[in-house]
Structure formats: structure tokens, C-alpha cells
Amino acid sequence: MEQHPIWKGKWTVLLAATGSAVGLGNIWLFPYKVGEYGGSAFVLVYLAGVLIMGVPLMISEITIGRFTRMSPFNAVTKLSENSRVPGAWRLLGFIPHIGSCTILTFYAVIAGWALLYMVHMATGGVFGSIQVAEESAAAFSRLQADPLTMIFYHTLFMAATIFIVAKGVIAGLEKSINWMMPLLFVMVICLLIYSMFSGQFMRSLEFLFTPDWSKINGESVSFAIGQAFFSLSLGMGSIITYGAYMAKEGDIAKTGTAVSLLDMLLALCMGLVVFPVVFSFGLEPNSGPGLIFESMPLAFGSLPLGNLFGTVFFALVAVAALSSSISLLEPTVALLEERTSLKRWKIAALVGGAIWLAGFSVVLSFNVWQDVHILPGKNIFDTLDYIVSNIMLPLGGLVTALWMGWLMKPSDARNELGLGPQWFGVLHTMVRYVSPVLLFLVLFTSLGIIQF
Ligand code: TRP
């Protein structure tokens, strides 16, 4: 089996994992789901999910990756070698690969929207010169009704993803990520300052943080946990794969904690950027996947040098999405590199090409195939969103917890982590008992076996 190269830079894994975690999940999905599921109740379950399960599982994924130095499927095979786990269970190792490819199918389409908005902001096109709320919603609907434009930008985005993965995560990723991530954080902080003065900041704080437990039900809990996993890139092999490239000297526990907290912070900041705009312009918080695309142009429209800021903002969204999409394609490319003798660029083109084609169905689900329902009342995009958030992510998280908590020898895990007995004890208990129990509950709720 092919050996992978290892990142030399001390900070590379931190930046790469943050690059994977920070993306459309924080900028696009988080505000949209918070709006759809009623604000604070969703946010609080999400925060609990990040702290109780997210941090320990992030650390677990890096540990599994660095210990085995393999892609997820082979990592599990390797972990099972010395155990008595029946062979068929190893097939669970395919879940991250299926999941990451499925996510990328719709991820690339949404990232394409960000590219389009960037271009329009720069050139003063339709989406870049919006002043009133009605115009902004109408412009977004027009985009949704236009499959060719969507396919054009979706194709551009997939081509960039494939290109970087084909070059390899070292040459392709290490350099760009050094300045992109910090710039995105600076930009979000500037926008946050703007929104503090927009008059609706307090209302947004309340919307996001004042607990209203009556709004919590099974569906919002499942989506909030799914959101925590999505945003942290957990359960689908991205972090296992990056862990496999991490230098031996790096501190896994610190890296995992830092990535999780940074990611959570950025999502909360985005909430505080988007909702003041939504409220000041009288938009509906529950307007769905278009939320940031309808709201942010309005904010830029009312700012001096708005188009410049808007261009930079959407460029950073696209770039953040790119550093995440790379981590969605990489696990499967790494697996095929380990298992076949094909060249990396061929594998990247094949796997990426298949995902690109599958993405057409997502584009069409917003227009021509709007009425093609897979699950009752859900078109192709809604179905993928539902299956990913409610089933694949909790399932991926569950198997990761079982691999770390039950399959990997505790002594191996502890050596790899270099933690003292107490901290290791806490971590191990969280992944061995707490996460599996909670995730079973989430899965049963999603499947309708438990109802509340
Ligand atoms: N976390 C990324 C985002 O927030 C998306 C992502 C990358 C992801 N890799 C993943 C989501 C693995 C789930 C699993 O945009």
C-alpha cells in the first residue's frame, strides 16, 4: 500500500483542519438552519453538541488518522487487524467515503452561488447592486430558475477542487491556507462591527441566545447535532485523512480543541452578522437556503465601498468553501491511491468527475426537477440535506466513537495523544460511552423510533 507524504509545517494540520471545518457550514448553513428552526433553542443544542461530542470526536479522528496513517476505510481495517471484530463490520469504514462524496455533490452547487455573487459584486452585476429586500429575493429566485448559470459556476468550483486535490494536499493546500483563514476571520470581525451598529444587534442576540425550550423538538435536536458535525467536518473522514498527514510532534488534543472552538466561534459570529441584516431589512429568518445570498448583498448595498467589501466577502466564502471541498474529495482519493496503482490526478478526475455529474441533479432540483420528490415533500436537494444531517452525520459520528472508544487499544490511543491519565480518562469516557448513547438517541429520533 502506498505511503502518504506528511506535512512538515507545525501549523499546517491546524490550518488545514480549520480550513476543512470553516466553510459553507458556518457561513451559509448555520444562519439558515438557525432561522428555520427558531433561533436560540437550535443554537443551544448545537453548542452543547460541539462541546460534548464535537471536541472529543475531533480529537479522536485526528488520533485515528495519525496512528494508522491511512484513509478512513483502510484506517478501520488496520484498527480491526488485532481485534476480534468480524470482517463484515469493516464495511462500516465505507460510510465516511459515501458521506463525503454525497456532501460534495450539493456543497459544490452552493459554493457556485458564492462564486457568482463574487463576480457580480466585482462587476456591479444584478446580484451586486441590490438595494431593497424585494429585489434581493427576486434576484435569488431568478438564479434558482436558471440551471445553466448554476451549472457554469458549479463546474468552475468542482474544477478548482479537483485541480488542487490532483496536485496533492501539500502543494495544493499548504500555501494558500496560510493567508486565507486569517483574512476570513478579519473580514467577519469587520462585518460584526458593522452589524453592531445596525440597530438590530440586540434583537439578534436575543434571537440567538435567549432560551425558548418550547421550540425544541426531535427534529430540531437532530438537525442541530447534524449541524455541529457538519460544521466541524466530523464523521465523514475529512479529519481522519488530515490526521494521517500530521507530523508526529504535533499536539493532537490542543489542535483538535482549537479547531473546534475556532469553528464554533466563526459560526456564532456569522449568526450575529446575518440576523441584524435580516431584521433591519425586514427579511424572513426562515427563508431557507437563500438566506445569506438574499441578506448580505443588502448590507453591502448600504455600505460605502459596498461592492468592494461584497467582492472580498464572497471571494472569501468561495475560498473557505474550497478549503472544505478539498477535504471532502481527499478521503476517497487517498483510499484509491492506497488501493490501486492509478495516478493521483486520474483518481481525482474520476471521483471528482462523478461527483460533478451527480451535482447536476441538485442544480435541477431547484428548477426543472422541483417537483421530483424522493422523500415525501422533499426534492433532491432537501432529501440529500435531510439524509446527510439526520442520518449520515450522526451515523458517521457514532462509528468514529466506536472505533476510537472500543476498537483502538486504549494504550495505543493514549500514546498517540500523549495525554496524562486524567485527561485521557475523560476523553475516553466521552467517546466510549457518552457520544454513542447520545448519537443512538439522535439516530432513533431521526428515524422516528423515538418521538418528542
Ligand atoms: N465543515 C465544512 C463546512 O462547514 C464542510 C465539510 C468538510 C464537512 N468536510 C466535511 C462536513 C466532513 C461534514 C463532514 O463547510
Image (tube, helix red, strand yellow):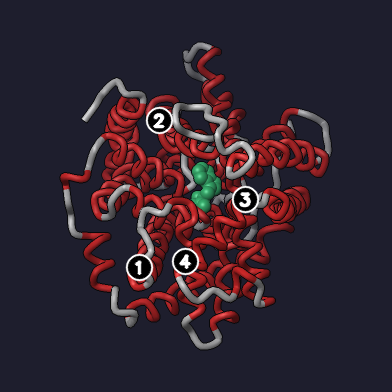
Give percent across and percent down for residue 154: 69, 51
Q: Secondary structure at mark 2?
A: helix
Q: Nearer the viewer, mark 4 or mark 2?
A: 4
Query: In the current view of this chain or complex, which residue is farthest to the bottom?
Result: 304
Circle 3 is placed at which residue position?
145
Residue 214 visible somewhere in the drawing: yes
Mark nearer the N terminus (1 vs 2):
1
- The amino acid pointed to by label 2 is Leu
Q: Which numbered dot is residue 398? A: 2
Looking at the image, is 297 positioned above or below residue 152?
Answer: below
Q: Does the numbered disc 2 mark a residue whose Cβ is under 8 Å from ligand 1?
A: no
Mark nearer the N terminus (3 vs 4):
4
- The amino acid pointed to by label 1 is Gly
Mark nearer the N terminus (1 vs 3):
3
Q: Quadrant of the C terminus?
A: top left
x 18%, y 59%: residue: 210
Q: Are marks 1 and 2 in contact (CB under 8 Å)?
A: no
Local packing at callout 1 (Cα closer than 10 Å; few below 14, some 14-19, many 20+) is few
Q: In front: 293, or 212?
A: 293
Instruction: Tell me where residue 116 sits by quadrant.
Output: bottom right
Q: Which numbered dot is residue 282? A: 1
Circle 4 is placed at which residue position?
134
x 54%, y 39%: residue: 381
Q: Nearer the viewer, mark 4 or mark 1?
A: 4
Instruction: Tell me where residue 220 sits by quadrant.
Output: top left
Q: Secondary structure at mark 3?
A: loop
x 28%, y 54%: residue: 39
Give percent across and percent down for residue 407: 44, 25
Q: Secondary structure at mark 1?
A: loop
- The amino acid pointed to by label 3 is Ala
